[in-house]
Amino acid sequence: MSQDNPIRVFASHAFQEHDDYNRLFEYLESTTNFFYANSAVPDTVPEEDTEEALKDELREQIEPAEVVIILAGLYEEFQEWIDFTLLVAKSSDKPVIAIEHFGSTQEIAPEIAEIADEVVAWNERSMVDAIRRQARHEETQRWDVVEFEMPESE
């Protein structure tokens, strides 16, 4: 993955932006040396505003993605669109990453958990590592270094 070859992601939406949708990209943008291209375009609503036209538009947005990200916080409000997104992702053999509810201990919907290849919390590092693993099969063995000083012995 490089700036010339970004990971192509699709994040679930229901043809309108949502706080969790915006928050996801804030997290991804704040990550250094992580390059992605978002194929999701929530504000692109087809001229013919029918359910089939909307489904066709979702298929077109999901098609170029290497990984599909499902935001669990959208499920209650937009269950039909999330279910459809999951169906398209799996029928296209695309890996699915589910991101838990933001700021809540609410359980992720079983319909999402069963289909997702990986479920992660709202943590920048967890999300980026999951995207790299699922999209490009990159292992991200990162280690945290904690520096501390030993008190001088007398």
Image (cartoon, rainbow, N blue to C red):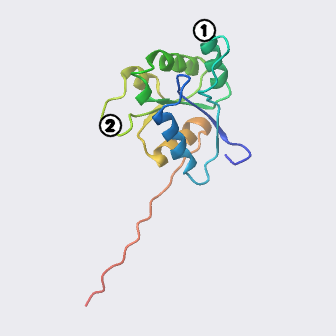
Query: At 54% from the left edge and 41% from the top edge, which residue is drawn?
Result: 25
Query: At 55% from the left edge and 45% from the top edge, which residue is drawn?
Result: 28
For the C terminus, the image quarter is bottom left
Can you tell which quarter of the image residue 5 is in? top right
- In the displayed structure, would residue 44 be above or below residue 149? above
Can you tell which quarter of the image residue 6 is in? top right
Q: Work out whether mark 1 precedes mark 2 in sequence or the reverse, and give the earlier one.
A: 1
The reply to whether discs 1 and 2 touch (Cβ–Cβ < 8 Å) is: no
Can you tell which quarter of the image residue 51 is in? top right
Query: At 67% from the left edge and 21% from the top edge, which residue is drawn?
Result: 60
Q: Which amino acid does label 2 sit on?
A: Ser
Please tell me how crowded label 2 is: few (under 14), some (14-19), or many (20+) other residues with Cα within 10 Å: few
Query: Marks 1 and 2: which is nearer the front?
Result: 1
Please tell me how crowded label 1 is: few (under 14), some (14-19), or many (20+) other residues with Cα within 10 Å: few
- The residue singled out by tag 1 in the image is 50
- Residue 145 location, x and y as percent? 44, 64
Query: At 42% from the left edge and 42% from the top edge, which residue is drawn?
Result: 122
Kindly give the residue lying farthest to the bottom in the view shown.
154
- The residue singled out by tag 2 in the image is 104
